[in-house]
């Protein structure tokens, strides 16, 4: 009933669970004291005691009520502290894990799924930790404590009540296997619906243009209907489980009460003691009954918790502690596979000098992007090594390496903030003069001045500027960062000719003092490169300057000529 992985997940916050359970035990004892006070008063009535004698049970009852109230309040406060600390800790750990993974994927988790896990998933786990676990430990202790109290009064009744108590956890265990499957499906359908909704919102323009919004609407309805059905299954399962627990709880309490009455009628049990047992009988089952109710919430939280654990258990990229010296990068006999079966890189050898432009080209699927993942440290090779300054990348400090590396790609993210704030990400103390100097290099200075200046807010996904302007702004931000190694991964993809020319000019200028690595599907962009690697099926087939490769009349020349003829055909 307790998932060990989820229990270990909260670390030092475990103490609050035990404190909450202990406070509930004190509250139970106070409740028993109140019941005993009532029975004491009844015995005084039977004995026709003096009025002053009723003061003592009244005082005991008041003290019990005060203690019970205090324990209830304190339990609520401790659970609240536990919930807040768990949420804060898990969100920090989830965020830090995503940061540690950096450029790595998060186990194939979609953006909607990642958001739901880190936000709502943590909320569900809050209930698991703050409600379910304290109630579990209290529910295990309460019947034993009550049995120890009642067995001295009438062992038969106490034994029957204790024997009926395990029927509730048995019913919970019987339901739990089915419940786990239902809740796993529930969470899967929920994240799937979130994915479809996010896709629909982000691609609304395309849906309208292609007049497929109605079809997408139907798919959304189908996804929502699947989620509704699984939600109904969850509710039916919860209702059935609750009904079974109620039957066990009230049936067991009824059996105990009946036995207490029989004790008075046939075994000489004092009626006042029988009254006490009758009032306490329900207390045997209430903690486990509440635990059973919390169980269903816990299963939903546990399903979310498994996804959080999967994220937290994702292996971190291997990094070391050495500082970067020379900026020369080399791939030596690098072989890599995503699935462990098919190699997407095969014995790749590449050299990227400290200065100059090096290009990697080839048809789609040849392994260019995988090489980029190797260069930025997202993945480690299956065989061979990636070195910087002769030091294996896994021995270098990530902070040191990234302090020298910049990547500009076709999907470089521009934040929903002012132009100035986006530049602050690259250099915290950057001056306005430096910003405008970088903007001037990418031919954006006048545009920014005429449209709000550096306080111009870039909307989400840079929707208030063109694709070419977005790419140029990303380049300007990276120019301010003043790194030693620049990786341009399809940086000129899907932009206008003017922006493409500006970016290519800056690449060439940078290559005079920096190491510039260009990955491009358009070979006309890599003509100025000092060295070009031409890839096919994960292997380097040719390397050299453009003129040498054209003279060789091999794969590169054929692809370059085909692209040139195609572009000239479009121009006509």
Image: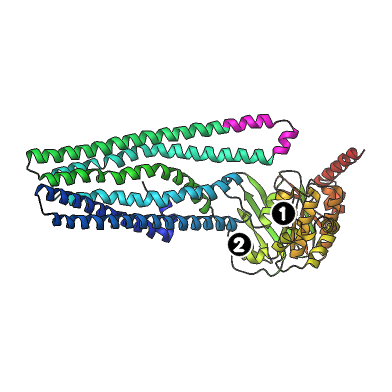
Name the residue that disc number 1 marks: 414
Identify the residue at horizontal 19%, vertical 43% (top origin).
278
Image coordinates for residue 499, horizontal then vertical, percent: 84, 51
Label 1: few (<14), some or many (≥20) within 10 Å?
Answer: many
In the picture shown, does residue 187 fall above or below 369?
Answer: above
Q: Are marks 1 and 2 in contact (CB under 8 Å)?
A: no
Q: Say which element carries label 1.
A: loop
Kindly indicate the quadrant of the structure image that contains residue 504: bottom right
Q: How are the colours assigned in the image? A: rainbow
Name the residue that disc number 2 marks: 394
Which comes before the other along the chain, label 1 or label 2?
Answer: 2
The reply to whether the magenta stretch includes residue 211 is: yes
In the picture shown, does residue 116 fall above or below 11?
Answer: above
Q: Say which element carries label 2.
A: helix
Image coordinates for residue 191, horizontal then vertical, percent: 55, 41
Q: Is residue 501 visible?
A: yes
Image coordinates for residue 109, horizontal then vertical, percent: 58, 46
Which numbered dot is residue 211? none
Image coordinates for residue 359, horizontal then vertical, percent: 78, 54
In the picture shown, does residue 505 fall above or below 301?
Answer: below
């Amino acid at each position: 009933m307790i998932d060990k992985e989820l229990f270990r997940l909260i670390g030092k916050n475990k103490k609050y669970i035990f404190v909450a359970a202990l406070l509930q035990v004190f509250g139970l004892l106070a409740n028993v004291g109140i019941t005993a006070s009532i029975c004491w008063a009844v015995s005084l009535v039977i004995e026709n005691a003096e009025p002053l004698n009723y003061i003592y049970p009244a005082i005991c009852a008041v003290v019990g009520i005060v203690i019970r109230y205090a324990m209830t309040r304190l339990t609520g406060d401790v659970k609240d502290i536990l919930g807040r600390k768990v949420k804060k800790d898990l969100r920090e750990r989830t965020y830090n894990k995503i940061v540690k993974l950096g450029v790595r994927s998060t186990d194939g988790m979609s953006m909607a799924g990642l958001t739901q896990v880190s936000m709502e998933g943590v909320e569900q786990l809050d209930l698991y930790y703050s409600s379910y676990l304290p109630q579990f430990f209290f529910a295990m202790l309460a019947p034993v404590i009550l049995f120890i109290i009642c067995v001295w009064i009438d062992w038969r009744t106490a034994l029957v009540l204790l024997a009926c108590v395990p029927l509730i956890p048995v019913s919970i265990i019987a339901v739990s296997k089915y419940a786990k499957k239902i809740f796993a499906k529930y969470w899967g359908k929920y994240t799937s619906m979130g994915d479809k909704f996010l896709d629909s919102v982000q691609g609304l323009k395309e849906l309208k243009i292609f007049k497929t919004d109605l079809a997408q609407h139907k798919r959304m309805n189908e996804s929502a209907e699947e989620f509704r059905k699984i939600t109904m299954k969850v509710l039916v399962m919860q209702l059935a489980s609750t009904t079974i627990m109620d039957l066990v709880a009230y049936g067991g309490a009824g059996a105990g009460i009946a036995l207490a009455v029989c004790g008075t009628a046939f075994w000489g049990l004092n009626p006042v003691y029988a009254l006490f047992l009758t009032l306490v009988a329900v207390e045997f089952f209430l903690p486990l009954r509440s635990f059973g109710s919390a169980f269903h919430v816990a299963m939903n939280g546990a399903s979310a918790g498994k996804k959080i654990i999967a994220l937290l258990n994702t292996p971190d990229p291997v990094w070391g502690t050495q500082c970067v010296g020379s900026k020369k990068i080399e791939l030596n006999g690098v072989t890599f596979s995503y699935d462990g079966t098919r190699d997407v890189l095969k014995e790749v050898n590449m050299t990227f000098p400290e200065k100059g432009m090096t290009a990697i080209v080839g048809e789609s699927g040849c392994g260019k992007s995988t090489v980029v993942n190797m260069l930025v440290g997202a993945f480690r090779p299956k065989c061979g090594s990636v070195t910087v300054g002769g030091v294996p990348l896994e021995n270098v400090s990530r902070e040191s390496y990234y302090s020298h590396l910049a990547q500009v790609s076709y999907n470089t993210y521009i934040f929903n903030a002012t132009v100035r704030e986006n530049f602050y990400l690259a250099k915290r103390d950057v001056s306005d003069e430096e910003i405008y100097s970088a903007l001037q290099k990418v031919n954006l200075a006048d545009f920014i001045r005429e449209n709000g200046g550096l306080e111009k807010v870039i909307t989400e996904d840079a929707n208030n500027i063109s694709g070419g302007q977005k790419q140029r702004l990303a380049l300007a931000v990276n120019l301010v960062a003043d790194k030693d190694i620049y990786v341009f991964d399809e940086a000129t993809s899907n932009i206008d000719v003017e922006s493409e020319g500006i970016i290519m000019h800056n690449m060439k200028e940078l290559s005079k003092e920096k190491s510039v690595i260009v990955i491009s599907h358009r070979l006309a962009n890599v003509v100025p490169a000092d060295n070009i690697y031409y890839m096919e099926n994960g292997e380097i087939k040719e390397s050299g300057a453009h003129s040498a490769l054209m003279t060789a009349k091999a794969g590169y020349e054929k692809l370059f000529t085909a692209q040139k003829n195609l572009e000239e055909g479009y121009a006509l």
